[in-house]
Image: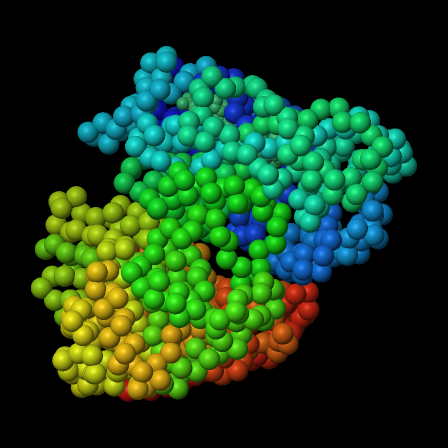
Amino acid sequence: MKSHAKVVVIGGGVVGCSVLFHLARHGWTDVVLLERDELTSGSTWHAAGGMHTINGDPNVAKLQKYTISLYKEIEELSGQATGVHLTGGVLLAATEARLDWLRGVVAKGRYLGIDLEEISAKEAAELMPLLDPSQFVGAVRNREDGHLDPSGVTHAYAKAARKLGAEVERFTKVEDIVRRPDGLWRVITNKGEVVAEHVVNAGGLWAREVGRMVGLELPVLAMEHMYLITEDMPEVAAWNQKTGTEIIHAVDFDGELYLRQERGGMLMGTYEKANKPWSEFQTPWNFGHELLEPDIDRIAPSLEVGFRHFPAFQNTGIKQIINGPFTFAPDGNPLVGPVRGLPGFWVACGVMAGFSQGGGVGLALSNWMIEGDPGADIWAMDVSRYGDWATMAYTNAKVRENYSRRFSIRFPNEELPAGRPLKTTPVYDLLSAKGAQWGVSYGLEVPLWYAPEGVKDEFSWRRSSDFSHVAREVAAVRGRVGLAEISNFAKYKVTGEGAANWLDRLLACKLPTPGRMTLAPMLKDDGRLIGDFTLANLGDGEWFIAGSGIAEQYHMRWFEAHLPVDGSVRIEALGPKLTGLAIAGPEARELLAKVTRADVSNAAFPFMAIGKMDIGMAPCLVGRVSYTGDLGYEMWVAPEYQRAAFQVLMAAGEQFGIGLFGSRALNALRLEKNYGSWAREYRPIYGPLEAGLDRFVAYGKEADFIGKQAALAERKQGGRLRLRTFIVEADDADVIGDEPIWFDGAVRGWVTSGGYAHHSKKSVAIGYVPKEIADESDGFEIELLGKRHAARMQPVPLFDANFERMRA
Ligand SMILES: Cc1cc2nc3c(=O)[nH]c(=O)nc-3n(C[C@H](O)[C@H](O)[C@H](O)COP(=O)(O)OP(=O)(O)OC[C@H]3O[C@@H](n4cnc5c(N)ncnc54)[C@H](O)[C@@H]3O)c2cc1C
């Protein structure tokens, strides 16, 4: 075994081998994979080997499509058969709600290049002869489904990597990982030590244990998973003989089942409700090529549905039940990327669908390690979407919930209950008493809307029970004054003598003068967005930044990686140490004036001013800015004062008819101002010109800010896309995001977010289209629940196009 390597990959499952292959293919050949046993000694060997392109997140779906397209290449490169059977498949809907969901999947497929087609249940039965069409209301055909040989694929990656110069050391167990003072990693094994610049944790079932070697508690948990294999079935033989083809895959969402042919019989897997975690606290090191005891009682309710939906199963025997563990992150998507605070330590774990996702994970990670960027939008898989709040107990609750809902519909207005409430702010009970309906953001409870006694969300793809109540909240803001909890923003404090210079280089905007705020895009080296913030200069060398709450860890990773080594700049994520309240509406200033002795007149405290002032007795930092696009103020307050500030504002607001508003009303308000948000409109695949944030980029400033050259090039060349707002001729449903935008009869773009703008009484969609058609006003259509709706471009904000209200 070599003593030094550029990269050590820990784990020879499908994911580690894919990472190794991609690193070598990308030109890093001084790389070694360490496997404690034979390759495939974790969850990989007993997988059912199914692969498919669809995923709830379109960017993950793209990487799944890439994974499937890769198998031919690695087979050719390695000479190792992968056993790929591209049978195609049907996705089955037993309810109308499921069919609505599937129509959304078909629609997304249009701009992702995934060939999906809605078919009737009868047509599905013609393709998949074992199903009873009377049990289903419709289906979708996916030509890119199939299965493969898990061991063949893993060895093909490894052999291909070796041919490119990478090394694989089997029976080499990593026992410890130690960071040297010079930043290199000592990877200590039972066979000696390797010193490496980079370490990749692809430990699969042992990813937690490998993480713990460097003090990291990763939010992953293994679950037991069962599939059965039947005896040979005459129906299968007859079909094979008649058509000369295998029986195609089927996913029966409402039965929570998947099926495929296995030799002369069938394989049926279940995601049962009565699920069971495996090795909740510690994975035993002596576990290897073993299976777990099957428990047919646990999966009996799923099998009952399966046998009804696929009646041929009633006449056949079960040859074998496989029960094996594999890992999940709380939301079921992989954990990939560099780990904040551990330079050179990377993870590629929590991959629950290694044969659909392993290739994409390897590609993204190798790009990231070699180029400094994953090369794709992988937010849905980024390890930084979790913070310290994703504890072991939280992960346990969420993974169990996610497993039991693997094939369940999640409606756009549906909030999942497991692992909650976890983080709450001091006004939680006060808002609950006012009817707050809670959602969750980065582990924190956030009010979505306020319901009268006895009313709650009815889950639906269409406008629902909250509609008129959100309209009432919006009316309070636009007509009088509204109050919202905004603690879910990320807040950062930046200090130190080097702070101004550092921010000037880090952020693309012009730095504000003391007492002022500005909108601050942050770019990567390739000139694309990696953040959008409000930056405030508090004077005396103190800076305050507010940004997207869900991206706190993501942004801290970026900030810290760019801090000067001389210690001249300090940055702190304030998280729950600072809570927030916001007031907005035409009476907002009158209200503020009633609760503070500070001069808040327009002259003394104009738009984008910021300063410290007391609200009642509570010391606050108050900025005159509002995401509602109205006259408004954001107030930042230490948690011990939040209740006092809230109560004084509510009491003083009574005379103005103050109303509470939640994040759904805020969404309705910002839509009619064409305001985008991080992770929807603003993502690391768009440039500032494309995203309409170029007006906040100080292209001419002296500082050589990160991404400046690329941003200048984008401005010169014009980029590819434009973010645009559309008014949709919708009937009873509004867009939620990821719907296709049609122009002139072809899909040309995609929706990033939208909803109903209650004040303007318009259904609004925001999304990207190619710049060539970005100035057309007509000819657009947006596909919603399987139907194309006419859409008109809305170039200026629907509300207060001249920005008079917020500047008044
Ligand atoms: C019953 C069942 C059915 C499944 N069906 C499918 C399916 O149809 N399609 C699909 O896509 N996925 C399926 N999966 C999931 C799939 O198996 C996983 O997504 C995949 O195996 C994850 O691969 P991995 O490389 O991340 O982890 P693992 O396969 O667990 O590999 C991790 C490797 O790391 C090694 N290792 C760990 N720690 C160390 C250390 N300290 N030193 C050295 N080596 C170490 C281990 O020995 C192991 O070989 C199924 C899983 C099960 C259990």
428 relative position to 752: left or right: left
Q: Residue at x 77, y 56 (%)?
A: 137
Q: Quadrant of residue 474?
A: bottom left
Query: In the image, is residue 725 above or below residue 738?
Result: below
Query: Does residue 509 appear left or right of residue 612 in this picture?
Result: right
Q: Nearer the viewer, residue 554 or 593?
A: 593
Q: Quadrant of residue 623?
A: bottom left
Residue 776 percent across, percent down from the top left: 55, 78
Q: Position of residue 282 (x, y in %)?
A: 42, 27
Expressed as whole percent of the image width and height from the top left, the position of residue 70 reads: 59, 37
Q: How many marks?
A: 0
Front residue (pair 137, 540): 137
Is residue 647 shown left or right of residue 412? left
Residue 128 shows up from this direction? no
Residue 464 x/y as whole percent:
58, 70
The image quadrant where one finds the C terminus is: bottom left
- Compared to 118, does 361 lie above or below? above
Q: Look at 14% across and 61% down and name the residue there.
A: 542
State which quadrant residue 512 falls in.
Answer: bottom left
Whether 448 is drawn above or below 497: the answer is below
- Relative depth, front residue between 127 and 212: 212
Q: Residue at x 33, y 35 (%)?
A: 216
In which quadrant of the rendered image does the N terminus lie?
top left
